[in-house]
Image (tube, helix red, strand yellow):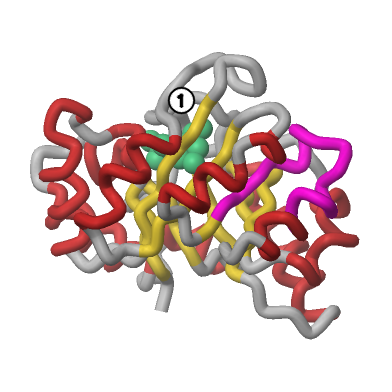
Amino acid sequence: MVKLAPSILSANFAALLDDVLKAEEAGAEYLHIDVMDGHFVPNITIGPLVVEALRPRSGMLFDVHLMIEKPELYVEQFIKAGADLVTVHVETTPHLHRVLAMIKEKGALAGVALNPSTPHGAVEYVLHLVDLVLVMTVNPGFGGQSFIPEVLPKIKAIKNMLSEKGLNAEIQVDGGVNRDTAAAVVQAGATVLVAGSAIFGKGDIIAAVREIREAASSNSY
Ligand code: DX5
Ligand code: ZN
């Protein structure tokens, strides 16, 4: 079954815990936490303190998406704060292999992310190290942007690369995922769907999670 990863970027930060608990009650498996530094992406969000504050309140898998330069400087802090999975962008470090190995060594699951314009080959030689490949279907930095359909073949290409190598990492898709786009990304090979505005931007979080899950299992795209 496809897993859902509500992104708190679109949650109500004045009542963050309420929104997180509703997503959990709705059956979401991951809690997607977007960390931005104002350098790699033109926005600033949250740091390890927020992860640490939420950690004792939720049993969801804490999925920390680092959109920061020099991720190697912060990986350990996020894991100590309670991250279960730490994902770093290919574009943020010349030492991707080393950072991914560091994440595993510190005891977390490791993910690698690709911007829409980054080719799938960029992760070929680290695939054996990762538990998840994150395919961005918007340019990272903001919630509520439109899905870029030209990225769909990249999801398929990563799926093929994983099966050729006999690996079974999750394929996570992030950006513009909603009830209209969910089926297409799942058909392409996505196993974990991130959704921010489509879940927290609506009045009813529980209904929104259900709606995306239903759309993800339909073939109606
Ligand atoms: C964007 C973030 C996403 C964002 C997705 O840089 O990585 O996780 O929250 O937002 P939506 O689902 O609204 O496109
Ligand atoms: Zn994200």
Q: Residue at x 30, y 58 (%)?
A: 212
87 to the left or right of 216:
right
Nearer-the-camera pick, 172 or 97: 97
- What is the secondary structure assignment of the residue under circle 1? loop
Place residue 124 in its image quadrant: bottom right
Which quarter of the rendering shows the C terminus?
A: bottom left
Q: Residue at x 59, y 69 (%)?
A: 170
- Percent across and percent down for residue 68 are 62, 29
Nearer-the-camera pick, 206 or 63: 63
Please determine whether, in this image, residue 102 is positioned above or below residue 15.
Answer: below
Total number of numbered discs in the rendering: 1
Please determine whether, in this image, residue 79 is positioned above or below residue 37.
Answer: below
Q: Residue at x 44, y 32 (%)?
A: 47
64 to the left or right of 108:
left
Is residue 115 at all visible to an observer of this figure?
A: no
Q: Is residue 139 magenta?
A: no
- Mark 1 within 8 Å of ligand 1, using the beta carbon: yes
Q: Residue at x 45, y 28 (%)?
A: 145
Give the magenta-colored segment's residue range. Answer: 86-100
Place residue 21 in its image quadrant: bottom left
> Which residue type carries mark 1?
Phe
Q: Residues within 10 Å of mark 1 (few under 14, many from 20)?
A: some
Please determine whether, in this image, residue 103 is positioned above or below residue 137.
Answer: below
- Percent across and percent down for residue 118 are 78, 39
Q: Which residue is mark 1?
A: 142
- Percent across and percent down for residue 151 are 66, 46
Q: Which residue extends farthest bottom?
A: 166
Place residue 1 in its image quadrant: bottom left
Nearer-the-camera pick, 197 or 47: 47
136 to the left or right of 1:
right
